Image: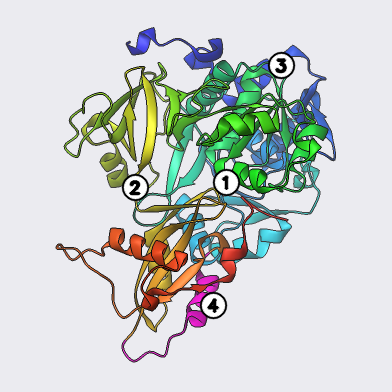
Amino acid sequence: MTAAQAPDPAGVPLVERTVPRMLARSAALDPDRPFVVTRERTWSHTDAHRIVATLAAAFTDRGIGQGSRVAVMMPTSPRHVWLLLALAHLRAVPVALNPDASGEVLRYFVADSECVLGVVDQERAAAFATAAGPDGPPAIVLPPGADDLGELGSAGPGPLDPGAASFSDTFVVLYTSGSTGMPKATAVTHAQVITCGAVFTDRLGLGPADRLYTCLPLFHINATAYSLSGALVSGASLALGPHFSATTFWDDVADLGATEVNAMGSMVRILQSRPPRPAERAHRVRTMFVAPLPPDAVELSERFGLDFATCYAQTEWLPSSMTRPGEGYGRPGATGPVLPWTEVRIVGDDDRPLPAGQTGEIILRPRDPYTTFQGYLGKPQETVDAWRNLWFHTGDLGDIGPDGWLHYRGRRKDVIRRRGENIPATVVEDLLAGHPDIAEVAAVSVPAHISEEEIFAFVVPGAGAALTTADVEAHAHAVLPRYMVPSYLALVPDLPRTATNKIAKVELTERARAAVEGTGDPADAPTRTSAADRVVVPAAE
């Protein structure tokens, strides 16, 4: 199938795939129906238009316009949505930052993104100001509970032109982790976000009567390109929770009237671990969209009274495959049939295609222009490397079966998946190694009881240093965001090496897992840190 033959997902032509156009189209169905819903309040499309128009005017007064990058640092909330929509109408670019970022990582985000302004909540104002420094961007600090953002101030609502933005414009910058170095700033286009929402709408059968619930962070692709974009494309309303709580989850989705929920695999495992109760089925939810599919999806579907759906996608990419609700149960790694908007190949180390059914790296090409990321900002070499031989290399392993279904088989990258975050091991290693008494660090993953993976750090003290794991943990809390602090620390005299003098991560991973299970070498016995006790995702009560 050529690019010209690729159908328009949800009937949305490529040139129409912008956030302002989809907002206007959804509002035209009925301006007074709900658009954003929380436990505290409901905002109609009319409300949204007023808030977004007022915000756009306020940003214009501050000199924000086409191409301006504005850092947004706050939890999932209606005001985060209003900021994204207002900046989109100005062709400005929000840079969505993890609100838990701090220290060196936050300093890197602020400098690397080249943002000219920050918009942060009061709780994060001091951290942002420290990261920006005296010569960095100023910040607008929002007081608690300011969901209408009237305090930004302006002469009032200005005109909104739904046709101002182009499908090729960058809609948002999201940071994504690679196998080396700090996370990369990924330029996500309007076309990519709306195509994601359109495919989501098509495959899940969404429409104006639906209510899409998410408590996932808007600095990740999921909440932005599936929940928010899905609501815009389908005409559904968007229900928001500030964070995931296993205690209140089912009450939240029921009280907010959700018919579809987006979740992470770790959230499902947490909910599964709780004692069954009537609230698990006292809701209107038809579909829970989650990656990966739970291995016991049949049993959980019956227990929770809903169907599961999943996909294969990345921050850089639209969904390459997606199941319909109820498909793929009992098929390990199944992500659905390859969809017509992406070319997918499975290749070996030399980039040559492998036979059907054989596992190799998943590489991708779009069929429509601007429907995938437009590069890593400020990192041309990394962009070229990712696109070698004119295919995007995902760093993931998979295979395509005879029925055309794509199966995910794991990662090639040195990345630890923890509580919804992709954490480059090299960042943990480099920042921990900044301690004067630490000679070397190797970070690997170990299975978590509930929340995906945990970080196990092998630490080699410097010569003659009287280093303790308590010293290392204190240093970790000082230099790393809390989601990067290792759960396990082991002091070792040296690290194993490969024949090419690289750290033998495979061997260390096996040693770490044995140590956690209590079956390994006593010399590797770790100290369990306070980070290991945090089991809720992505933020907890």
Q: Is residue 441 left or right of residue 37?
A: left
Q: Is residue 261 visible?
A: yes
Q: Between marks 3 and 2, how big is the CA–CA gap? A: 40 Å
Tag 1: amino acid = Ser
Q: Between marks 1 and 4, how big is the CA–CA gap? A: 27 Å
Q: Residue at x 71, y 60 (%)?
A: 123
Residue located farthest toward the top when viewing the structure as drawn? 5
Q: Which residue in the protein does label 4 denote?
A: 474
Query: Percent x, y for residue 319?
Result: 46, 27
The magenta region covers: 463-480
Q: Between marks 4 and 2, how big is the CA–CA gap? A: 33 Å
Q: Is residue 90 visible?
A: no
The verdict on residue 465 being magenta is yes
Q: Residue at x 83, y 34 (%)?
A: 255
Upstream in sequence: badge 3 or badge 2: 3
Upstream in sequence: badge 1 or badge 2: 1
| Nearer to me, 67 or 418 | 418
Determine which of the numbered discs, if any, sits on residue 266 in the image. Answer: 1
Q: Which residue in the protein does label 3 denote?
A: 208
| Nearer to me, 194 or 120 | 194
The verdict on residue 280 being magenta is no
Q: Are marks 3 and 4 in contact (CB under 8 Å)?
A: no
- Tell me the SS state at disc 4: helix
Upstream in sequence: badge 1 or badge 4: 1
Q: Are marks 4 and 2 in contact (CB under 8 Å)?
A: no
Q: How packed is label 4: few (under 14 Cα within 10 Å), some, or many (20 or more)? A: few
Q: Which residue in the protein does label 2 denote?
A: 379
Q: Height in image: 447 above or below 272?
A: below
Q: Quadrant of the N terminus?
A: top left
